[in-house]
């Protein structure tokens, strides 16, 4: 599945009966998000760092991610600073990673495309 394919998938909330993803399951989803942005931390959560040309772009990106989070009812921790937004995300209900975390990451990657600084 390609990154854009993952971003198009529906975010379906897990239940308390679902187990967090581990090992190969995480690897399969991780392969479809931007590895230069995201890392998996202790098979528990995703942490991503997005870079921007200035504070305004970082702020606008943060706003768009906030709107996405409200729409999907899946809320990451966002840390905004000049030229950078750090995102931490996991599914609190199961205290670990679930498919929706990776779907949200792929959608954030897509949002960031319009703000990415010229290299």
Image (cartoon, helix red, strand yellow):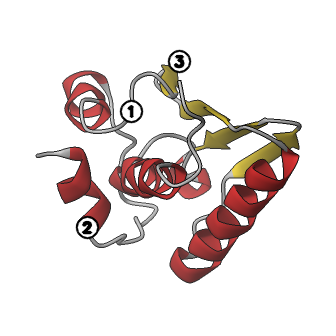
Mark 1 Cα shell of 10 Å, populated few (<14), some (14-19), many (≥20): some
Question: Residue beneath label 1, please?
Answer: 34
Where on the picture, by quarter, is residue 2?
Answer: top left
Q: CA distance from mark 1 to mark 2?
A: 15 Å
> Which one is nearer the viewer's eye here, 49 or 24?
49
Of residues 28 and 42, the one drawn nearer to the viewer in this rendering: 28
Q: Position of residue 68 (x, y in %)?
A: 57, 72
Residue at mark 2: 8
Q: Residues within 10 Å of mark 2 (few under 14, many from 20)?
A: few
Residue at left 39%, top 47%?
102
Q: Secondary structure at mark 3?
A: loop
Q: Is residue 55 left or right of residue 30?
A: right
User: Can you identify the residue that label 3 sits on?
Assistant: 42
> Which residue lies at the image location 56% right of the left edge and 45% below the top edge?
90
With 81 as the anchor, is 50 left or right in this view?
Answer: left
| Lower sequence index among marks 1 and 2 | 2
Residue 40 image position (x, y, % from top left): 48, 24
Residue lying furthest front: 118
Q: Name the residue rendered at 81%, 41% in the picture.
A: 54
Extreme residue in the left direction? 1
Q: Which class describes the residues within 10 Å of circle 3: few (<14), some (14-19), or many (20+)?
A: few
Tag 2 and tag 3, C-beta contact below 8 Å: no
Q: Nearer the viewer, residue 80 or 72?
A: 80
Q: Indicate whether 13 appears above or below 31.
A: below
- Rendered location of residue 24, percent (x, y): 20, 24
- The mark lying in front, picked from 3 and 1, is 1
* Secondary element at tag 1: loop
The structure residue drawn at horizontal position 74% and vertical position 67%, both measured from the top left corner, is: 63
Q: Give the mark, 3 or 1, whose residue is nearer the N terminus.
A: 1
Look at the numbered discs 3 and 1 and tell me whether their residues touch, using CB distance below 8 Å.
no
């Amino acid at each position: 599945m390609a990154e854009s394919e993952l971003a198009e998938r529906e975010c379906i909330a897990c239940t308390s009966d679902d187990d967090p993803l581990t090992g190969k399951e995480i690897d399969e989803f991780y392969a479809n998000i931007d590895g230069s942005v995201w890392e998996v931390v202790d098979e528990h959560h995703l942490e991503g760092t997005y870079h921007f040309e200035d504070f305004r772009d970082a702020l606008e990106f943060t706003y768009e991610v906030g709107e996405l989070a409200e729409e999907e009812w899946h809320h990451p921790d966002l840390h905004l600073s000049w030229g950078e937004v750090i995102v931490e995300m996991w599914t609190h209900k199961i205290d670990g990673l679930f498919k929706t975390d990776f779907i949200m990451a792929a959608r954030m990657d897509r949002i960031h495309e319009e703000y990415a600084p010229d290299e």
